[in-house]
Amino acid sequence: FSTMQYVMAGNETEGLRYGSIQTPEKYYLTWKEDGPGDNPLDRALRQLCEKGRFLELVHDFIVFDAGVKKLCRHNQYFGVRAAQDHVRRREGGILWHTQGSGKSLTMVWLAKWIRENVTDARVLVITDRTELDEQIEKVFFGVDEKIYRTKSGADLLVKLNAAEPWLICSLIHKFGGKEDGEDVGDIKSFVEEMKKAIPKDFRTKGALFVFVDECHRTQSGDLHDAMTAILPDAMFIGFTGTPLLKADKKKSIEIFGRYIHTYKFDEAVTDGVVLDLRYEARDIDQSITSQKKIDQWFEAKTKGLTPLAKAQLKQRWGTMQKVLSSQSRLQKIVGDILLDMEVRPRLQSGRGNAMLVAGSIYEACKFYELFAKTLLAGRCAIVSSYAPKTADIKGEETGEGATDALEKYGIYRQMLADWFNEPSDKVMGKVEAFEKAVKKKFIDEPGQMKLLIVVDKLLTGFDAPPATYLYIDKQMRDHALFQAICRVNRLDGDDKDFG
């Protein structure tokens, strides 16, 4: 069956659905396109199986992603087709495809088409977050395309000055010589550093196409001017998964050009590509101390006990309300999440897990310290930009108890020591390995990694289908908020109805 490209099924009332060998029924796709005719089956067959288009779909729009055969959705096909027209005219623009709708694979299909159809074509993918840079590298490797990930701004300029490699990805910060993927910093100093790093004989080789991921964030005037000064002959295509707000939209369109294609959140929900999101505002004082919450907790804890045993135990639980009402705010939030872990079906079963967004790295550490004393010990972790270094605590000994920096340092070191089962002084350089391991466990074994505590990391470009709940204890707005809440909108089995 390896040569089987498409498997289709349909009838005259429900139309046509398609997949490939071993595609689960739930993930079969529906083709959506305006056209004449009332019969949905006939219309879809005419559109999907028209000879030229069908051959194009087989040739240009099938990939093996880490061994799994993937076909394109209608939004990916029409997005790439629209971008092809822009490429032929050498006209930039913006592809707005909502979070979770396969934007990375759209990039792959467009890059592959450009390579096949444009002489001496080269593609540079620019991101502005470390995790997005890593994700794009992973996606291209998964489809057997070797992508070179630049190590610095100077390295990027050297590679662009040579004829190879044809496919490159780089953090936007490296245009300014910085290696930190978490903080944009001072763009003007980036530009100055960049100008100093340009070799005298510098000229990009080949026909260069620049894909700018999450272009609403990296469209800053000074930085974009610097990029176009270095790459004057390049064509820029912006990709975004979030709605462009009024001011951003005007600026982004001025820089990249008009929309090439759009696929919005409500369209993706209607198509069953992503899940809808439900929002619940919680007043922690009221939520955690409500009788309903306490009764839910009690029922979860006493499941299977006889009525007499339940009654005896309930007497001891009479003080729970008083205990909870006297706790600190962070303790109340921890208690609230622990209640959910016991009563929410996906969290209870171990099929799903959750993320908690803290307001600062210090607060993330304090949350972790509290969770480490509960049943979530060993199944909870912090992922942040912080890495404990001795220099961070130099001069912090005040004689009046631990400072915030000392507490953060101590909690992080202890978390690493517990994970690797090694002395705390031996694990200082293992933050990257720890992060990689807990992310893998969060995705592959949700019952064994039930909660990730984050601050800024993993709120963009982190694709974890088991993630079902997102707790936000931080002021967030606009793009950052939309991207964060979309971490929990991925499909994951019949028991996940929404994020």
Image (spheres, rainbow, N blue to C red):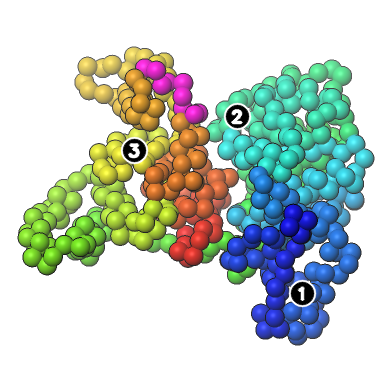
Q: Quadrant of residue 181?
A: top right
109 over 21 or under it: above or below: above
The residue wearing badge 3 is: 378
Earlier along the polypeptide chain: callout 1 or callout 2? 1
Q: Secondary structure at mark 1?
A: helix
Determine whether, in the image, residue 445 is placed left or right of residue 399: right
Query: Which amino acid lies under the numbered mark 2 shown in the image of this protein?
Result: Asp
Q: Residue at x 80, y 30 (%)?
A: 165
Which percent across, then down, holds residue 20?
A: 70, 61
The residue wearing badge 2 is: 186
Res 423 seen here: yes
Asked whether disc 2 touches disc 3, contact meaning CB atoms under 8 Å apart, the reply is: no
Query: Which amino acid lies under the numbered mark 3 shown in the image of this protein?
Result: Gly
The residue wearing badge 1 is: 44
Residue nearer the viewer, 61 or 180? 61
Segment colored magenta? 425-433
Residue nearer the viewer, 175 or 409? 409
Q: Secondary structure at mark 3?
A: loop
Q: Residue at x 50, y 28 (%)?
A: 432
Which percent across, then down, holds residue 61?
A: 78, 55
Which percent across, then down, holds residue 210?
A: 77, 40
Question: Quadrant where the N terminus lies?
Answer: bottom right
Q: Residue at x 64, y 30 (%)?
A: 173
Q: Quadrant of residue 282?
A: bottom left
Spatial separation of the CA atoms under disc 3 and disc 1: 50 Å
Res 329 seen here: no
